[in-house]
Structures are given as structure tokens and as C-alpha cells.
């Protein structure tokens, strides 16, 4: 009996997406628009972190946000009401991630003229979003203290693709078995170049460091 023919669909799909992502990045570069892809588990504090950060930066940068979820517009409304900036909701139709084409469709509905920074809050999980290049300039992720310090060991790809790891909810550190230094060590194992910033989005502690990082990134991108 002849062997069954096997087609490597996954490889070709990723290759097409990578080309789309590179094309999108080039277009954004020509327009002077910086795109940040922000990922995390549900409940890590992405939206609270964004509100704090945007309010620190909105007098220095012109910012827009794209909120990606399977359903609802809760986060987009929350961002707009708390910051006053342009905010749109992306529904993924059940998909657990965004790819470059989906990101482009979102950007087509953002008024990019006069915008310096677009933040994409990706769908909340630590697996699928890490597999797809969205066309962003940088990838960042938020790890919250209650999730545990071993997540870089359990989700290697997520931490490998991220340029910045924000460790949120530092205010509850005394109540959880979370070793900050060990977590930093695990992150460096996955990506030696990744920067780690501990914060508490609830009270604002450390958020200024994230805002300063973003401001420097956008400034360098536009040069």
C-alpha cells in the first residue's frame, strides 16, 4: 500500500504570515507608527496596566489601542472611558490569537494619521498568540504574581518571543510562593535580551518604567 501523502500546512501558513507581518511592519515604519503586541493570560492585569501607562504617556505620544477578544467590548470601552484615547474592539470569531492579516484589518479601522503608538492587546492566553507574528515592532507580555514564577519554564515560546516581560501584582507578592529573582532567571533562560519590569498596576508602582521604555522605543522607531 502506498504511503499517505503528508502536507506540512502549518509551515506554509506561518511562512505566509511572516511575509505579511514583515510587509505590515514596513508600512508602519513608513508612516512613523509604532505597534506593540501585548500578550498575557486572562486576568493578569493587561487593561489596568494599559490605562496607567497611557495616562502617563498621552501628553507625550498620540496613542490608539486595539483590544482583541473572542467576544464583548468591555476592555475597549474601559480604555476609552479611562483615558479618552482612540480605542477599538477586535472580535476574533472564536480564534485564540491574532495574525498579521487580522492585525491589518484592525489597523484599517484605526485613524492612523497623527498616531505615534498603537497598542494591540492580544487575546488572553500564553500559547497561540506567541506563535503568530502580528507585524508589531516589539512583543511584550504580562505575568502576574498569582500565576507563579515557573511560567517561563512551562510556556517557553511566549517568553522567547517577548522583548519585555512585565511582572504585575507585586503588591500581593508576600501572599504567594513567587520568587522574583528565580522568575527573572527563568526569563533570561528563554531570552537573554528580554527586559523584566516588576510593577503593580493597581497602585502604579513601577509603571513609569514601562512608560519610559515605550517612549524610548517609539522615539527610536520614528527616527
Image (spheres, rainbow, N blue to C red):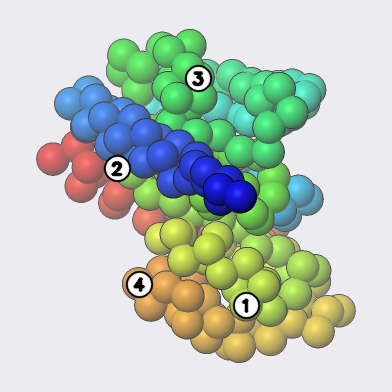
In this rendering, the label closer to the viewer, 3 or 2? 3
| Label 4 with label 2: CB-CB less than 8 Å | no
Q: Work out whether mark 1 precedes mark 3 in sequence or the reverse, and give the earlier one.
A: 3
Compared to 136, does 94 lie above or below? Answer: above
Give the distance between the C-alpha atoms of the residues marked 3 and 2, in whole angstroms.
20 Å
Give the distance between the C-alpha atoms of the residues marked 4 and 3, in whole angstroms.
29 Å
- Work out whether residue 148 can be spotted: yes
Q: Work out whether mark 4 precedes mark 1 in sequence or the reverse, and give the earlier one.
A: 1
Residue 121 at x, y percent in the picture = 58, 38
Of residues 174 and 67, the one drawn nearer to the viewer in this rendering: 67
> Which image quadrant: the C terminus?
top left
Q: Which residue is mark 3?
A: 106
Q: Residues within 10 Å of mark 2 (few under 14, many from 20)?
A: many
Compared to 218, does 61 lie above or below? Answer: above
Q: Is residue 62 left or right of 6 when viewed as pictured?
A: left
| Label 3 with label 2: CB-CB less than 8 Å | no
| Label 4 with label 3: CB-CB less than 8 Å | no
> Which disc is residue 153 wearing?
1
Q: Which residue is mark 4?
A: 193
Give the distance between the C-alpha atoms of the residues marked 4 and 1, in whole angstroms.
17 Å
Q: Residues within 10 Å of mark 3 (few under 14, many from 20)?
A: some
Q: Work out whether mark 4 precedes mark 3 in sequence or the reverse, and give the earlier one.
A: 3
Residue 9 at x, y percent in the picture = 50, 40
In this rendering, the label closer to the viewer, 1 or 3? 1
Q: Residues within 10 Å of mark 4 (few under 14, many from 20)?
A: few
Give the distance between the C-alpha atoms of the residues marked 4 and 2, in whole angstroms.
19 Å
> Which disc is residue 218 wearing?
2
Q: Residue at left 43%, top 13%?
A: 108
Residue 207 at x, y percent in the picture = 54, 57
Amino acid at each position: 500500500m502506498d504511503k499517505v501523502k503528508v502536507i506540512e500546512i502549518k509551515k506554509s501558513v506561518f511562512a505566509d504570515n511572516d511575509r505579511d507581518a514583515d510587509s505590515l511592519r514596513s508600512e508602519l515604519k513608513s508612516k512613523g507608527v509604532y505597534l506593540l503586541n501585548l500578550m498575557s493570560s486572562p486576568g493578569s492585569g493587561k487593561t489596568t496596566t494599559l490605562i496607567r501607562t497611557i495616562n502617563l504617556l498621552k501628553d507625550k505620544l498620540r496613542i490608539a489601542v486595539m483590544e482583541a477578544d473572542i467576544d464583548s467590548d468591555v476592555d475597549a470601552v474601559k480604555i476609552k472611558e479611562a483615558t479618552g484615547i482612540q480605542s477599538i474592539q477586535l472580535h476574533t470569531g472564536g480564534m485564540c490569537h491574532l495574525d498579521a492579516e487580522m492585525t491589518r484589518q484592525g489597523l484599517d479601522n484605526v485613524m492612523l494619521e497623527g498616531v505615534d503608538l498603537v497598542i494591540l492587546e492580544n487575546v488572553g492566553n500564553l500559547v497561540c498568540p506567541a506563535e503568530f507574528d502580528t507585524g508589531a515592532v516589539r512583543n511584550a507580555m504580562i505575568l502576574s504574581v498569582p500565576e507563579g514564577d515557573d511560567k517561563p519554564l512551562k510556556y517557553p515560546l511566549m517568553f522567547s518571543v517577548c522583548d519585555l516581560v512585565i511582572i504585575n501584582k507585586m503588591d500581593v507578592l508576600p501572599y504567594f510562593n513567587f520568587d522574583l529573582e528565580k522568575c527573572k532567571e527563568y526569563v533570561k533562560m528563554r531570552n537573554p535580551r528580554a527586559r523584566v519590569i516588576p510593577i503593580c498596576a493597581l497602585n502604579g508602582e513601577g509603571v513609569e518604567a514601562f512608560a519610559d521604555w515605550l517612549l524610548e522605543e517609539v522615539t527610536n522607531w520614528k527616527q
